Amino acid sequence: MTDRAPAYILALDLGTTGNRAILFNAEGAIVSQAYKELTQYYPQPGWLEHDPRAIWDDTLWAMQTALQKAGVAASAVAAIGMSVQRETCLLWDKTTGRPLHNAIVWQDRRTAPLCNQLAEQGYAAEISDRTGLILDAYFSATKLAWLLEHIQRQQDPPIDLDNVLAGTIDTWILWNLTGGQVHATEHSNASRTMLMNLAEQQWDSKLLKLFGIPGHLMPKIQPSLGLFGYTQPELLGNAIPITAMLGDQQSALFAHGCNHPGLLKCTYGTGCFLIAHTGEQLPLSQNQLLSTIAWTQPEIEREVAGENSLHSRDYKVGYALEGSIFTTGACIQWLRDGMKLITAAADTELMAQRVADNGGVYFVPALSGLGAPHWDMSARGAFFGITGGVQREHIVRSVLEAIAYQVKEVVQAMNQDTSTEIARLKVDGGACQNNFLMQFQADVLGIPVERPKVLDASAQGAAFAAGLAVGFWQDYTALTSSRQIDRVFQPGEGVTQAQGCFPTWLEAVKRAKHWAK
Ligand SMILES: Nc1ncnc2c1ncn2[C@@H]1O[C@H](COP(=O)(O)OP(=O)(O)O)[C@@H](O)[C@H]1O
Ligand SMILES: O=P(O)(O)OC[C@H](O)CO
């Protein structure tokens, strides 16, 4: 085992589909990794839960395995950075460490009726003004309200709320890593709860009251880069500082070097998330995009960060505009697990290429309603244009095409909001391995699509952020520009076909809206 001066950064990418740990060396290259897919629980149509214990167990296993595979001791790790699926939230008992219910996942629609009720009571505009978000079941606030009501109804004798803690996945994992000593989150995750005041970057007391969430349940909010705590030594063999936490989409933005306006990235994972950094000014969307925090970091930039700068209270805020698309890679999983049309996600690429076109089939991927730019909780998935000649390949192709059409809708909204024409799309995430999808994306957008060698930009961003925060690396620009590009997909001979089909897909979307009302 290597046991010298810290020479590595350990990144955690805790996504919807699965949990991964990746060990990066000082050159920013991947040394080893470990991954486990996470079980998805669908207790009712439109509901989705994760077992928080499984997330923690898999995270610990992935960290231990990545270190073992590389033969690296924990003492050689300078810091841990964490990137997490956002909005998914839970409650747990701080005396036992036991979750009080499964975590409610961001895609879960069970609180749509509560959102509708709040909208009818006239709260939508005020919520949006305070948080930058659009009133929707996607965000944590109504999920936490549901959980609180549920556990209070279920527990006999009633649960003592003084023993209860609330948190998103970053908070839950941090609490476990530190042996229950630190209950904290950071601004990029907090900005997705619908409980943080975006301008003030603090829990909003009016919203906590509106959603019935006692403030003492909520974690402390810290800057995204900085010291959060140390791992319990017995977990990995040594105490390692945790020096960055980010929402996974913001983490990918960080990795792409998008720290100023004019650049746009799209992460193709369970969903697709397009984010543009908008600088230090709070952005306002006219096109149904979200205003959110990109990341925050200590104001004092030092050559080599020490304890003091890590504890600094002064921080710099970066804002962003985001278009959140709920169901993209998740449709591929559904083709595999639900429909059994494919055996592996990668099969979709060859199947789509086997047919010349979509055979007139259009898919609306509203399996969890529609996010940006429609925000329709009651839309449901639909296939249109099925005829007797339609084959499996057409169905698969229509699903991949639908991912690209959704991204186009959001790019158009971004262009309008930022009054610029995005010239190139930077991509990452598991589903952008698919060459058919990437080429179709470039064709339908009419701009180049740039795919990096390291597709897990969320993990990479968490590693970069943690390494910069601890002084392992010093230069953000040099670090992010050293990333290698795997391939640039140029708009090609498919442009006419792809762009010609887009209006028909928009028509299909119209017909799938307001279905579950
Ligand atoms: N070759 C592929 N083609 C299309 N989709 C893929 C492919 N490989 C993986 N995916 C999809 O990518 C998603 C996993 O990507 P990942 O970035 O790990 O997601 P997350 O961060 O949401 O957990 C899954 O939903 C999977 O269906
Ligand atoms: O799990 P991912 O990577 O699809 O990301 C989920 C998002 O953070 C939800 O907002």
Image (tube, grey):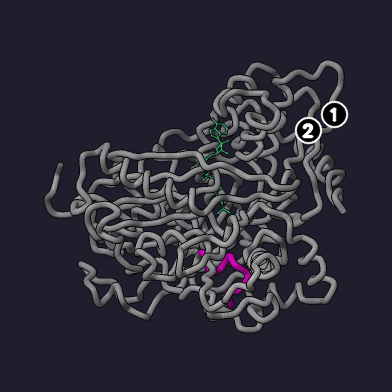
Q: Indicate the position of residue 253 as horizontal and vertical percent values.
A: 47, 55
Q: Whole-percent x and y of residue 79?
A: 28, 58
- Vertically, is 84 above or below 305? above
The residue furthest left is 4
- Name the foreground residue: 399 vs 137: 137
Q: Residue flagged by tag 2: what amino acid is it?
A: Tyr
Of 271 and 77, which appears nearest the observer?
77
For label 1, the SS is loop
Give the extent of the magenta segment: 189-197
Q: Which residue is mark 2?
A: 362
Q: Residue 275 sits in which quadrant?
A: bottom right
| x 23%, y 53%: residue | 237
Q: Are circles 1 and 2 on residues that touch, CB within 8 Å?
A: yes
> Compared with residue 451, is residue 297 higher up or lower down, i.e. above or below?
below
Per the image, is 51 magenta? no
Question: Taking 359 as reference, is 367 above or below it?
Answer: below
Residue 285 seen in render = no
Q: Secondary structure at mark 2?
A: strand
Q: Residue at x 58, y 52 (%)?
A: 274
Tell me if I can see residue 38 in this picture. yes
Label 1 Cα crowd, 10 Å radius (few <14 / some 14-19 / many 20+): few
Cα distance between the residues tagged 1 and 2:
6 Å
- Camera-side residue of 166 and 244: 166
Q: In the image, 382: left or right of 64?
A: right
Of labels 1 and 2, earlier in sequence is 2
Question: x, y percentage for residue 30?
Answer: 31, 41
Task: Locate residue 143: give its quadrant.
Answer: bottom right
Point 31% across, 45% down: residue = 64
Given residues 83 and 420, the one toward you in this image is 83
Q: Amino acid at mark 1?
A: Gly
**With 439 as the anchor, is 44 left or right in this view?**
right
Residue at the disc numbered 1? 385
